[in-house]
Amino acid sequence: MASLRLTINGRTQVVQAGPDTPLLWVLRDRLRLTGTKFGCGVGVCGACTVLQDGKPVRSCQVTAAAAQGKAIVTVEGLASEHAHLQQAWLEEDVAQCGYCQPAMLITAAGLLREHPAPTDQEIDKAFEGVICRCGTYGRIRKAVHRAAK
Ligand code: FES
């Protein structure tokens, strides 16, 4: 165990964890930020996506130690700064089962930060690594365009 200093959703806190513990489990088990989901644990599904210094990363593939000094944002931290994004998601009725949607919202926030008015191709590329078994990609595309207006 080590004392790790993490900045999550704008708040810096000290967490006791093994340095090799994946950030995903620190978020979910230590900090109770359960919006970030576990899917595969091997970097394939994208369900665990969070923003690290503004860029989407897979939190199952980032160690807690490596996350120190980085600004981590989870879906819980999107509420204030990206309310328009969540509103667009509601207006386009994006979610079906909902399991992947925190990762989708985080991915959208990262995309819009880099491309404020993304093309369909940029949207499709951003989301290609985040798996939605319900196939909500068409509605996600519409919601991203709506949020970008
Ligand atoms: Fe991290 Fe699947 S749980 S990519």
Image (cartoon, grey):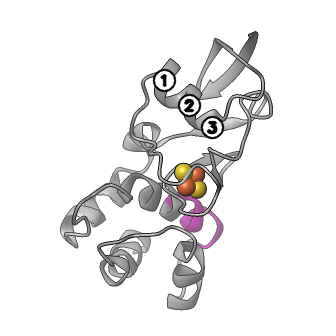
Q: Is residue 13 left or right of 69 when viewed as pictured?
A: left
**Which of the two residues, 25 or 77, is positioned nearer the viewer here?**
25
- The residue located at (21%, 66%) in the rendering is 96
Disc 3 on helix, strand or loop?
strand
The C terminus lies in quadrant: bottom left
Judge: label 2 CB < 8 Å from ligand 1.
no
Q: Quadrant of the N terminus?
A: top right
Instruction: Give the mark toward the camera: 2 or 3.
Output: 2
- What kind of residue is marked 1? Asp
Q: Position of residue 61 (x, y in %)?
A: 70, 47
C-alpha distance separating marks 2 and 3: 14 Å
Of the residues tagged 1 and 3, which is closer to the observer? Answer: 1
Q: Indicate the secondary structure of the residue bearing disc 2.
A: helix
Numbered disc 1: secondary structure? helix
Give the residue number, with chain letter if any, for mark 2. 25
Region rendered in magenta: 109-115
- Above or below: residue 16 compared with residue 85: above
Which residue is the site of mark 1?
29
Up/down of 56 relative to 70, above or below = below
Residue 24 coordinates in the image, percent (x, y): 57, 37
How much space separates mark 2 and mark 1, taking CA atoms? Answer: 5 Å
| Callout 2 touching callout 1 (CB < 8 Å) | yes
Q: Quadrant of residue 115?
A: bottom right
The spot of residue 147 in percent (x, y) is: 38, 69
Tell me what residue is drawn at x 46 percent, y 69 percent: 131
Residue type at the position of mark 2 = Trp
Q: Residues within 10 Å of mark 3 (few under 14, many from 20)?
A: many
Q: Which residue corresponds to mark 3?
A: 72
Q: Is residue 37 magenta?
A: no
Estimate the spatial distance between the alpha carbons at disc 1 and disc 3, rounded to whole Å: 16 Å
Q: Which x, y percent locates residue 16?
A: 66, 10
